[in-house]
Image (spheres, rainbow, N blue to C red):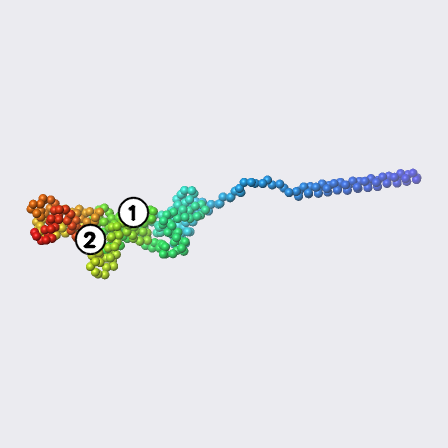
C-alpha cells in the first residue's frame, strides 16, 4: 500500500515538473516571438533610401486658353467691347503662324479696329497701326481724344465718293459724283478717292476714313482743300473772293477755253473761226492747251500756229513766239 502511494506521489511529481518545464518553454517562445516582432518593427522604421535626381525639374506645359477660332474671336470681342459695342459676327479670324490667330473686321463692319494677333495663352496684340491706335484707346479707358469710334460709317466705295463730293460741293456745286472713284486701303481701312482720268479737272487724291474724316493726300488735294475752306468761310474781301473763285473754275470745259481765247483775239482777229481753235486738257498742269491759226502779227513773220494756255480761272498765257506776237498786237490794240 505504501509502495503504491509512493508510486503515485512520484508520478504526480513528474507531471508537475513536466508542467513547469512546458510553462517555461512557452515563455521563451513568446519572448522569441515578441523579439521577432520587435525586430520586424525596428526594420520597418528604418529610413527608405530614395535615389537622387540630378537633372532640371521639368516645367509643366501650360493648358491652352485659346484652342480654336471660336475662342480666339470671343477673346478679341471681349477686349474690344470694353469701349465700343461690336457684333461678334463682324470679327473675321484666320489661323496665322506659330499657332496664333489673326483677327480683323469683316468687309462692311461698322468699326475699323485693325488687325490683331491672339495666341494660345489668350494674349492679344495689335498687328498694325490701326490696331495699335485702338489698343491705346482701350487702355486709356476709352479716351475719345485718342480715338472717336465711327458714328457715320463709310462702308462702301459709293459712301466714300459721296462723302468727298458733299465736302467739295460747298465750293464746286457743278461737280458730279462721276468724277471720282474709290479703292479701299486694306492696311489702314480708309478709302482712297481719286479723280477719274476722264474728268476735265483734277481734284487730287483724298483719304476718306470709316468715320467720314477727310484728308488730302497729295499737293493738288491740299490746294483744293484750302480753296474749299476759304470758300466755306469767306466773309468778303478781294483776296478771299479770288481764292473762292479759284475753287469753282471759270473754265470748265474745252469749249469754255475755246470761247475764252476767241473772245480775247476777236477785237483784232474777227475773222478767226472759233471752231478752228483746238483745245486739249493738260491734267498735270490743270489747264487747257489751245492752238489757234490767226494771221501773222508781222507780215515778215512765218505763218505758224499760236499755242496758248488757258487756266481754270480764265487767264490766257502765250506759249510760243507766234502767240507772243499775237498777244502784243491784241494787248496794245494796234490791230
Query: Quarter of the image holding residue 167?
Result: bottom left
Who is closer to the viewer here, 291 or 38? 291
Q: Residue furthest right?
A: 1
Q: Residue furthest front?
A: 300
Whether residue 90 can be seen here:
no
- Left or right: 137, with 237 as reference point: right
The label on residue 22 is none
Residue 184 horizontal/vertical position (percent): 31, 47
Label 1 or label 2, whichever lies nearer to me, is 2
Whether residue 285 can be seen here:
yes
Q: Which residue is mark 1?
A: 183
Residue drawn at point x = 27 percent, y = 49 percent: 218
Vertical order, 237 against 221 (above or below): below
Residue drawn at point x = 42 percent, y = 51 percent: 78
Q: Which residue is mark 2?
A: 249
Q: Residue furthest left?
A: 299
Q: Quadrant of the N terminus?
A: top right
- Secondary structure at numbered mark 1: strand
Do callouts 1 and 2 mark residues in contact (Cβ within 8 Å)? no
Q: For the residues marked 1 and 2, what is the alpha-carbon distance in whole angstroms?
A: 27 Å
Q: Residues within 10 Å of mark 2 (few under 14, many from 20)?
A: some
Sequence order check, earlier mark of 1 and 2:
1
- Secondary structure at numbered mark 2: loop
Amino acid at each position: 500500500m505504501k509502495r503504491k502511494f509512493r508510486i503515485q506521489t512520484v508520478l504526480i511529481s513528474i507531471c508537475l515538473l513536466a508542467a513547469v518545464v512546458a510553462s517555461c518553454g512557452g515563455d521563451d517562445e513568446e519572448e522569441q516571438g515578441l523579439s521577432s516582432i520587435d525586430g520586424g518593427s525596428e526594420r520597418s522604421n528604418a529610413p527608405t533610401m530614395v535615389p537622387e535626381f540630378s537633372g532640371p525639374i521639368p516645367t509643366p506645359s501650360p493648358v491652352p486658353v485659346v484652342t480654336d477660332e471660336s475662342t480666339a474671336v470671343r477673346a478679341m470681342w471681349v477686349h474690344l467691347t470694353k469701349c465700343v459695342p461690336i457684333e461678334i459676327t463682324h470679327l473675321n479670324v484666320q489661323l496665322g503662324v506659330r499657332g496664333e490667330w489673326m483677327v480683323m473686321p469683316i468687309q462692311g463692319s461698322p468699326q475699323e479696329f485693325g488687325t490683331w494677333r491672339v495666341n494660345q495663352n489668350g494674349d492679344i496684340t495689335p498687328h498694325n497701326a490701326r490696331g495699335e491706335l485702338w489698343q491705346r484707346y482701350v487702355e486709356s479707358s476709352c479716351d475719345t481724344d485718342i480715338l472717336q469710334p465711327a458714328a457715320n460709317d463709310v462702308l462702301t466705295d459709293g459712301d466714300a465718293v459721296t462723302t468727298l463730293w458733299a465736302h467739295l460741293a460747298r465750293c464746286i456745286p457743278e461737280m458730279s459724283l462721276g468724277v471720282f472713284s474709290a479703292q479701299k486701303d486694306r492696311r489702314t481701312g480708309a478709302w482712297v478717292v481719286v479723280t477719274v482720268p476722264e474728268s476735265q479737272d483734277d481734284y487730287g487724291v483724298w483719304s476718306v476714313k470709316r468715320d467720314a474724316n477727310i484728308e488730302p493726300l497729295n499737293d493738288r488735294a491740299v490746294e483744293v482743300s484750302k480753296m474749299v475752306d476759304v470758300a466755306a468761310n469767306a466773309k468778303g474781301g478781294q483776296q478771299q473772293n479770288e481764292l473762292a473763285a479759284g475753287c469753282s473754275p471759270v473754265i470748265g470745259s474745252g469749249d469754255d477755253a475755246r470761247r475764252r481765247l476767241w473772245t480775247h483775239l476777236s477785237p483784232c482777229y474777227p475773222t478767226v473761226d472759233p471752231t478752228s481753235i483746238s483745245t486739249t486738257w493738260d491734267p498735270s498742269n490743270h489747264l487747257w492747251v489751245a492752238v489757234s491759226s490767226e494771221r501773222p502779227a508781222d507780215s515778215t513773220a512765218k505763218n505758224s500756229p499760236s499755242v496758248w494756255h488757258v487756266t481754270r480761272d480764265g487767264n490766257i498765257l502765250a506759249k510760243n513766239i507766234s502767240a507772243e506776237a499775237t498777244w502784243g498786237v491784241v494787248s496794245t490794240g494796234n490791230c
